[in-house]
Amino acid sequence: MNSHQELEDFFQINLRSNIDMLRRMVEINSFTANPDGVNELGDLTVEFFSKLGFKPEFVQCENPDFGKHLILTQSEENKGAKNEKPVISLISHLDTVYPPEEEIANNFFWRLEDDRIYGPGTVDIKGGTVMIYMLLDALQTIYPQEYEHFNWMVFLNAAEETLSEDFGRLCKGRLPENTQACLVFEGGSLGTKDNPLVVARKGRAVFQVEVEGRSAHAGNYHAQGANAIVQMAHTVQTIASFTDYERQVTFNVGTIEGGSVVNRVPHHAQASVEMRAFDPQIFSEGVNKMMALNGTSQVSSGDGYSCKVSIELKDQTDPWPRNEMTNWLHDLWTEAASSIGMGVMAEERGGLSDGNWLWDCFPTLDGLGPSGANAHCSERSQDGEKDQEYVLISSFVPKALLNTSAVLGLIKESS
């Protein structure tokens, strides 16, 4: 088998062209709610990966206001005994969180500053898509026999930033039982000499809180009113008290509104709440705590009319906890890192990714993209308190070397 030095040299030689690939991706606005931009990026991604012998399939997101998911599979002449080979799935997404107007307002475009590349999606997650290309390109070129051991499938979500559940169903529907790994190329974190690999992510539940009160003239008949906003104040204090940092469960009251005019006792208030937790049992307990608030009331009118609280669970994405299959992949990356003089560490993230949809069916590992910072931030201040999203050029080659070495270990173990 070729030396790691040959692999590293390959990445260094091709780094400039790979960074140019990233530039072309970043120059396309692919805000989730900009389907034309998302689809344009999908077409460009097809152009790049066709050079590696992949053919595209586009699947419209279930939300018609969003773009098309993209599945890349090996063309027929490269598939060989397609149904007999195990599969490795490589996961990224096409969309970002930045509307075109925000990019313009904050002058947030492709910009090189020393080792940093600033721009929308540089680390979340267009740099990850480039990392997938680097991995496949190196395997095809330097390790063609090993490459042929697997069928390779690349999935790109058109609406990951909105947690499109249909993408998870699409992946599960297309991936066969002999899928050996789902590798998610979200960006790597900074602040440590070791490479953080994501082995767990919090789940998220979103609730709508409604309070029905009774309106009244605030001057003449105040006592007849049941103030929905005051009741909501009691309710959100209760919800906030559910947060327990030791158990790593948080409740965030994200929005709140109510009332109409100042001389009227408000009859209605509403709030949106997000809960996140790593542990499935704690997550379930949190949902139950929220739902138990249905029908509670602390605020009444002078004649005994009580406000009514109602809770609706609007959306739920279950946690991805530490598990044996993910730990198995993490061990392979640890062994690969040791063999090339690098280090890795396990990271548990509070944010969600497409790994939340897949971990319970297939071995899943995340955080395999290049390293950067300030994902989802387009603002920059002169004092440095705020800075825009960026990726480190220097992180591409080491991370590609680590990922490729680990995948070679996976191939060896699967042989």
Image (cartoon, rainbow, N blue to C red):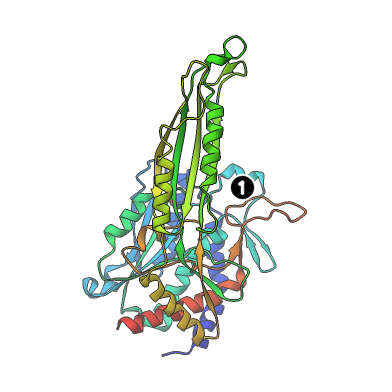
Q: Residue furthest right?
A: 383
Task: Read off the residue under disc 1.
Answer: 103
Name which quarter of the figure residue 101 lies in. top right
Q: Give the quarter of the figure containing the N terminus.
A: bottom left
Near-viewer residue (190 or 236): 236
- Residue 269: x and y, percent? 51, 28
Count of numbered circles in the view: 1
Q: Relative to residue 301, is residue 173 depicted above or below?
A: below
348 on left or right of 329: right
Q: What residue appears at the point 39 percent right and 56 percent down from the top-left corner?
A: 281
- Residue 114: x and y, percent? 70, 68
Q: Relative to residue 76, is residue 209 depicted above or below?
A: above
Q: What residue appears at the point 25 percent right and 66 percent down from the top-left corner?
A: 176
Name which quarter of the figure residue 240 lies in. top right
Q: Relative to residue 96, is residue 132 depicted above or below?
A: below
Near-viewer residue (102 or 48): 102
Inspect this view and state whether residue 388 appears: yes
- Residue 184: x and y, percent? 43, 65
- Residue 337: x and y, percent? 50, 82
Q: Relative to residue 222, is residue 78 depicted above or below?
A: below
Q: Residues within 10 Å of mark 1 (few under 14, many from 20)?
A: some
Near-viewer residue (227 or 306): 306
Q: What residue appears at the point 31 percent right and 81 percent down from the top-left corner?
A: 414
Inspect this view and state whether residue 67 appears: no
Q: Give the quarter of the figure containing the C terminus.
A: bottom left
Q: What residue appears at the point 41 percent right and 69 percent down from the top-left corner?
A: 51
Secondary structure, mark 1, is helix
132 on left or right of 385: left
175 on left or right of 382: left
Near-viewer residue (184 or 328): 328
150 on left or right of 236: left
What amino acid is labelled 1 in the image? Glu
